[in-house]
C-alpha cells in the first residue's frame, strides 16, 4: 500500500472537518430529517458533489459527526494508558475530559441523535455497529486487563461497560431536558461518577 502524502492527508482531514462543522450547524438548526446534503454543502461553502467525496449520504455525515465527538480513534490509546496508571486518578481524569468535550455544538448533535435514533433504523444500526460497539470492545479488553492485574473486581465486563456508558448518556439526556442541577454542577460530576463506579454507595464497603 502506497504511503499517504502527509500534506494531502492534512488537506483531506481539514475539508472533512469543514463539512462536519457545517453539518453540525445545519442539523442543529433544521433537524436531521429536514436538512439536505445541499444545505450542508451551502453551509460548508462547497459544491454538493464534494460532500459525496467524503460521505456516502446524509446518515454517514451524522455518523462522522458522532465519531468525531466520540473520539473513537483515540479510545484504544486512552484505555491502554489506564492499564498502567492509578485507576481512580485515570478514571476521574478521563471522565472530566469526556464531559468537557461536550461543547454547545455537541449538545445540539445529541439533541438531533436522540430525536432520530429511535425512529431511524439505518442510523441506529450503523451508530451502534460503527461507533458504540467498537468502543465497548476496546473498553472491555481494558477491563479484562484491569481484572487480571487485580485492580478491580471481576464483574461481567460487557455489562459493566454498558452501565458506565448509560450513566454518561443518561446525564447528557437529563441536561438536555433542562436539569438545572446538572447545568450548574456539571464540573462536579467526574469525582462523583468515579467514586460511585469504583467504591459504590454502601457505607463501609471498599474495593480490595
Image (tube, helix red, strand yellow):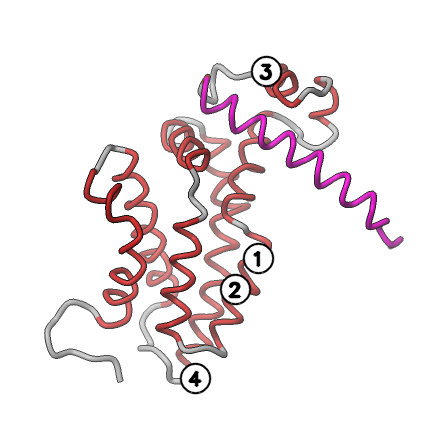
Ranked by sequence position, the earlier of labels 1 and 3 is: 3
Ranked by sequence position, the earlier of labels 1 and 4 is: 1
Residue, disc 2: 78
**Residue 39 bears which disc, if any?**
3
Question: Alpha carbon of mark 4 to alpha carbon of mark 2: how far?
Answer: 18 Å
Name the element at disc 4.
loop
Q: Are marks 4 and 2 in contact (CB under 8 Å)?
A: no
Q: Residue furthest left?
A: 203
Residue 79 is situated, as x and y percent measured from the top left of the image, at 50, 66
Q: Nearer the viewer, residue 17 or 140?
A: 17
Ranked by sequence position, the earlier of labels 2 and 3 is: 3
Q: Nearer the viewer, mark 4 or mark 2?
A: 2
Q: Quadrant of the N terminus?
A: bottom right
Q: Main secondary structure of the magenta part?
A: helix
Left or right, 103 with reference to 198? right
Q: Are marks 1 and 2 in contact (CB under 8 Å)?
A: yes
Q: Residue at x 58, y 37 (%)?
A: 64
Q: Quadrant of the C terminus?
A: bottom left
Classify 63 as above or below 142: above
Question: Alpha carbon of mark 1 to alpha carbon of mark 2: how far?
Answer: 6 Å
Question: Alpha carbon of mark 2 to alpha carbon of mark 3: how far?
Answer: 35 Å
Name the element at disc 1.
helix
Residue, disc 1: 74
**Residue 149 bears which disc, if any?**
4
Question: Would residue 18 be counted in the magenta stretch?
Answer: yes
Classify 12 as above or below 115: below
Residue 149 is situated, as x and y percent measured from the top left of the image, at 43, 84
Q: Which residues are magenta?
A: 1-29
Ranked by sequence position, the earlier of labels 4 and 2 is: 2
Amino acid at each position: 500500500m502506497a504511503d499517504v502524502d502527509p500534506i494531502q492527508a492534512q488537506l483531506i482531514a481539514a475539508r472533512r472537518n469543514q463539512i462536519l462543522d457545517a453539518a453540525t450547524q445545519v442539523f442543529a438548526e433544521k433537524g436531521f430529517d429536514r436538512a439536505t446534503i445541499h444545505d450542508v454543502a451551502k453551509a460548508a461553502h462547497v459544491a454538493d458533489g464534494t460532500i459525496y467525496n467524503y460521505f456516502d449520504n446524509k446518515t454517514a455525515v451524522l455518523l462522522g459527526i458522532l465519531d468525531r465527538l466520540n473520539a473513537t480513534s483515540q479510545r484504544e490509546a486512552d484505555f491502554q494508558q489506564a492499564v498502567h496508571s492509578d485507576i481512580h486518578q485515570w478514571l476521574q481524569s478521563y471522565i472530566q475530559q469526556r464531559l468537557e468535550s461536550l461543547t454547545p455544538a455537541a449538545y445540539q448533535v445529541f439533541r438531533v441523535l436522540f430525536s432520530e435514533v429511535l425512529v431511524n433504523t439505518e442510523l441506529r444500526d450503523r451508530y451502534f455497529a460503527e461507533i458504540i460497539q467498537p468502543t465497548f470492545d476496546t473498553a472491555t479488553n481494558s477491563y479484562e486487563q484491569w481484572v487480571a492485574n487485580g485492580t478491580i473486581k471481576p464483574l461481567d465486563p460487557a455489562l459493566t461497560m454498558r452501565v458506565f456508558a448509560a450513566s454518561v448518556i443518561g446525564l447528557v439526556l437529563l441536561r438536555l431536558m433542562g436539569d438545572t442541577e446538572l447545568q450548574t454542577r456539571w464540573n462536579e460530576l467526574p469525582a462523583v461518577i468515579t467514586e460511585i463506579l469504583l467504591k459504590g454507595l454502601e457505607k463501609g464497603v471498599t474495593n480490595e
